[in-house]
Amino acid sequence: MRFLVLCAFLVSTTAYAQDWPTLKGPYLGQKPPGMTPEVFAPGIISLDGERELNTVFSPDGRIFMFSRQINGTFKMYFSAQNDDGVWSRPRLAGPSRTYPGHSDVDMMFAPGGKRVYFISDRPLPGYSLDRHNIWYSDFGPHGLLTPVALGPHINGPDHELYPMLVGDGSLYFSSHRADTKGRWDSYRAQFRDGRFDTPVNLGPAINTEHAEGDIFVNADETILIHNASGRPDSLGQGDLYVSFAKPGGPWSDDVHMGKVINTKANEYCPQLTPDGKYFFFTRGNELMWVDAKVLRQFKKSSDKK
C-alpha cells in the first residue's frame, strides 16, 4: 500500500534515462562503503554534470529523498521501495511541481515518517521572495499534501535552514537572529503540546563568531554533526564538525572531522541513516556515504577535551 501511495505521489517527468536499473535491497541495493567516503550510487543517483545534495531516508528505510538543481533551483526527488524490495525510478516530488521558479530543499522526515519538513523560498505572505522558510507537508492518501509554513516564531526575518527533527519531535535548524554569534547559528525548538517553543541558541560549544549550519542531530540527541566555515582549522570552503552529548549536560565542544571527511571542497548536509549504520553527506556537488563507525575516532578525541 505504501508503494502504491508513493507512486501516485511521484511525477512522470524525470532526468533519468529509460534504462533505469533494477535496484533491490537496502540503500538502493548499493554495495556498502567502508571507512573511506564513497560517492553514493554513481551514475544512478549521483549523475555527472548535475548538482545533487541532501540524502534522507525515511525511518523505515523504504523512501529515499534527495535534491537536484534544475534550471537554477533545487527540487526534491523521491524513490520508493516496493514490497519486493525494488526501488522506483526517482521522480520529482509533488510540492516541487508548484512554483517552478522557487527551490525546495533541506528535507527531513519527522518521527514516524508521515510528515516531511523542508525549506523553500516559495511565496509566503509577509516575507520577501529571497528568504527561505521552513515548511512541512503531510502524507495523504495520494501523496504529500499542500505544504504549510511554520509560524513567525520559527520563520524569522532571515533565512531558516536545514530543519532537523529528533525523537521527541523537537526541531533543530540554523538561522541568523538577535542572539546569533556569527553569520549563522544553530537553534533548538522544543516540541511541546503540539507546537514548537521559542528557539534556543545552542551556545558556544556549537556556535562561534564564524558561520555554523546544516545541523544533523540523531533521534536520541547524543550525536550532533554540522557544517562550519571560516574557522582557523578549516580545510576548505566549509567543513564538518561533530559533537557528542555530555551525560546530563550540554553538548561537548565540537571536533573537526579531519581529512577523513573534509577536503578543500565544501562538506555539508550531514545525515546518519535511521539505523545508524551509515553517515551520508554532500561534498561539492556529489552525494557521499561512509560507514558510521568512522565517528568512533572523533568520540575519542571529544572525550579528551
Image (tube, rainbow, N blue to C red):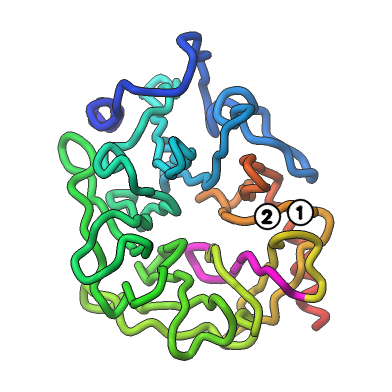
Q: Name the residue located 22 percent from the left edge and 62 percent from the top edge.
A: 124
Disc number lying in front (2 or 1): 2
Q: Quadrant of the N terminus?
A: top left
Q: Position of residue 265 (x, y in %)?
A: 74, 52
User: Residue 197 magenta-drawn?
Assistant: no
Q: Name the residue located 52 percent from the left edge and 63 percent from the top edge.
A: 218
Q: Residue furthest top?
A: 19
Q: Position of residue 21 (x, y in %)?
A: 52, 14
In this picture, which residue range is highlighted in magenta?
218-231
Residue 276 as seen in the image, left or right of residue 64: right
Disc 2 to disc 1, C-alpha distance? 8 Å
Query: What is the crowding at mark 1: few (fewer than 14 residues within 10 Å), some, or many (at least 20)?
Result: many
Cβ–Cβ below 8 Å for labels 2 and 1? yes
In the rendered structure, which disc, 2 or 1, sits on the residue that comes first in sequence? 1
* Disc marking residue 179: none
Q: Residue beneath label 1, please?
A: 261
Residue 115 vs residue 293, the one in the foreground: 115
> Vertically, is 166 above or below 118?
below
Q: Residue beneath label 2, please?
A: 267
Q: Position of residue 89 (x, y in %)?
A: 42, 22
